[in-house]
Image (spheres, helix red, strand yellow):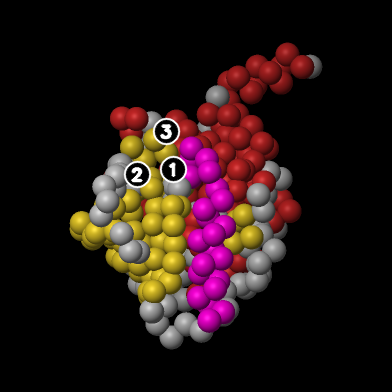
Amino acid sequence: MAGLRLRRQIGQGTQSTVFLAEPVAGGPAVVLKLVSLAGADERARQAFLAGADTARRLVHPGIVAVLGAGVEGELGWLAMEAVPGISLGRYTHPARLLPEPLVLHVAEVVAGALEHAHRQGVVHRDVKPANILVHWPSDTIKLADFGLARAADADQTATGVVPGSPAFMAPEQLAGSVPTPASDFYALGVTLFQLLTGRLPHEAETLGDLLRRVSSQPAPDLRTWRPDLPAPLAGLVAGLLAIDPACRPAGGPTLRQALQQALHPAQGADSGAKSR
């Protein structure tokens, strides 16, 4: 954190505060995330640093770059690339939905970012609209907050708390299993569902009730609220939200192909006709 001057607060979470900062010696502004580690033991501190180190290895146009990290006293800090624009959290209300083709374009970029991370054995763990940053004039779309990311074979955090946002978690992740690439795809499915309908596929009063619902009840069809949406798109989202991880897309290339078919269903039909 040394060498950075705070300019203004730009975000607040339950355990973190986000600032826009600038290097004292000059240079581009950065985003500085301060995470409270009060009461955390040494193992939890090392887990924070390991997550940051994992995120620094990910260099991709669809991923917000992590520039540095450290622990000072009871604060962990994460310095990240400053991305102009807004988060997709702004477009999750039924009255402020994005056009379907734009949502699918965003999904393609995010799928590419996840494919890059998964190839390196890294799982994001917290894909959601608030962690997707967009700057429409420059067509910049980036997946943020890889600070939670860990190697795919890593244990849960030492504190025993499952990291992430429960409403976007796959059933296996909510149950306490180590997240896998399939867990990220489920979270992308929840993200698409919310961006297309302004609703979450499953809502519950408690974490236990949410786990019971996502583990036993298939997600509702998108067309319950958006009958105008094409069947291939509804099928894609249903596949991402499959209860069984093995029934979700097998990987990034498969997902991108499904997104292309959902975006251009007529082309997919033409290709099928030509092959017969």
Residue farthest to the right?
276
Nearer the viewer's eye, disc 2 or disc 3?
2
Q: Amino acid at mark 1?
A: Lys
Q: Nearer the viewer, residue 74 or 63?
A: 74
Circle 2 sits in a helix, a strand or a loop, which is it?
loop
Q: Nearer the viewer, mark 1 or mark 3?
A: 1
Using the image as rendered, state which of residue 128 and residue 261 is in the foreground: 128
Which residue corresponds to mark 2? 83
Which quadrant: the N terminus? bottom left
Label whose residue precedes the other's in the sequence (1 or 3): 3
The residue drawn where x is 27% and y is 51% is 25
* Residue at the spot 33% in from the left edge and 64% down from the top edge: 2
Q: Residues within 10 Å of mark 3 (few under 14, many from 20)?
A: few
The residue range painted magenta reads: 42-63
The amino acid sitting under disc 3 is Leu
Residue 157 is situated, as x and y percent measured from the top left of the image, at 57, 74
Who comes first in sequence, dot 2 or dot 3?
2
Evaluate whether residue 4 shows in this view.
yes
The residue that disc 1 covers is 142
Magenta run includes residue 59 = yes
Q: For marks 2 and 3, give the CA distance.
A: 19 Å
First in sequence, mark 1 or 2: give its number.
2
Residue, disc 3: 102
